[in-house]
């Protein structure tokens, strides 16, 4: 569903990476899944390609169980263990990010470039927020920590369209 169809305010559309924009980014670098796996040093078995076809091009932030459910629609005999092992392999090879955005909830993100996330508390949908839209100040002042990476996870609800006065 695009943001325009949802009738969201323009400033929210610019802030959050919409599904359409997210998919357009994926299509810019879209290559054959088997070739992508080979380039990453992964032997492209039928099961790995089936998982990759979904998870490397989705606009969702799926859990492992959701990946298993989606892949089983096209590849009904794939096991849950195969999906979990494949997702972990994809993370190890840098094709996916593993995100722990809330307690007891791990999801996977095919966008490996640095960015933040916004979780809509009403719908549970996770939106990508471009890195340059959020500033975190004074990270270097945390001298007692060796910070090598960070991301901001925001929670709230999407604003509806603003009324004109």
Image (cartoon, rainbow, N blue to C red):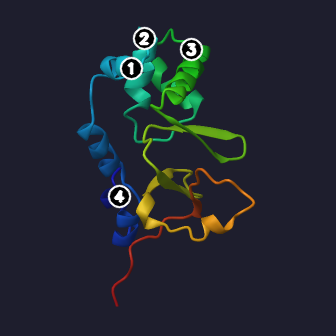
User: Could you say which is closer to the camera, residue 10 or residue 134?
Assistant: 134
Residue linked to disc 1: 37
Q: Residues within 10 Å of mark 1 (few under 14, many from 20)?
A: some
- The structure residue drawn at horizontal position 60% and vertical position 50%, both measured from the top left corner, is 148
Q: Which residue is mark 2?
A: 43
Disc 1 or 2, which lies upstream in sequence?
A: 1
Residue 128's place in the image compared with 51, above or below, is: below
Q: Nearer the viewer, mark 3 or mark 2?
A: 2
Q: Nearer the viewer, mark 4 or mark 3?
A: 3
First reached walking from the N terminus: tag 3 or tag 2: 2
What is the C-alpha distance between the residues marked 4 and 1? 32 Å
Residue designated by label 4: 3
Q: Mark 1 near mark 3, Cβ–Cβ under 8 Å?
A: no
Between marks 3 and 2, how big is the CA–CA gap? 14 Å
Outermost residue toward the left in this view: 28
- Assign a secondary structure to mark 3: helix
Instruction: State the image coordinates of residue 53 (x, y, percent, origin top left).
Output: 37, 24
Is disc 2 placed on a helix, strand or loop?
loop
Quadrant assignment, res 137: bottom right
Q: Of circles 1 and 3, which is in front? A: 1
The residue tagged 3 is: 82
Q: Are marks 1 and 2 in contact (CB under 8 Å)?
A: yes
Looking at the image, which residue is at 40% across and 67% down? 12
Taking the view exactly as shown, the residue that stands out farthest to the front is 143
- Marks 4 and 3, how far apart in space? 34 Å
Q: CA distance from mark 1 to mark 2?
A: 7 Å
Q: Quadrant of the C terminus?
A: bottom left
Q: Residues within 10 Å of mark 3 (few under 14, many from 20)?
A: some
Q: Residue furthest bottom?
A: 165
Which mark is drawn over residue 27?
Answer: none
């Amino acid at each position: 569903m695009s943001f325009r169809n949802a009738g969201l305010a323009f400033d929210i559309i610019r802030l959050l990476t919409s599904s359409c924009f997210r998919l357009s980014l994926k299509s810019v670098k879209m290559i054959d899944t088997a070739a992508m796996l080979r380039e990453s040093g992964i032997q492209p078995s039928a099961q790995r390609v089936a998982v990759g076809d979904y998870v490397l091009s989705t606009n969702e932030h799926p859990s492992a169980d959701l990946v298993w459910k989606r892949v089983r629609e096209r590849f009904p005999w794939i096991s849950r263990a195969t999906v979990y092992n494949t997702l972990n392999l994809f993370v190890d090879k840098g094709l996916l990010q593993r995100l722990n955005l809330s307690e007891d909830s791990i999801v996977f993100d095919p966008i490996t470039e640095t960015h933040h996330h916004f979780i809509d508390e009403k719908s549970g949908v996770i939106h990508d927020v471009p890195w340059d839209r959020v500033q975190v100040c004074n990270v270097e002042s945390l001298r007692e920590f060796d910070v090598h990476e960070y991301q901001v996870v925001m929670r709230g609800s999407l604003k509806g369209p603003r009324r004109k006065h």
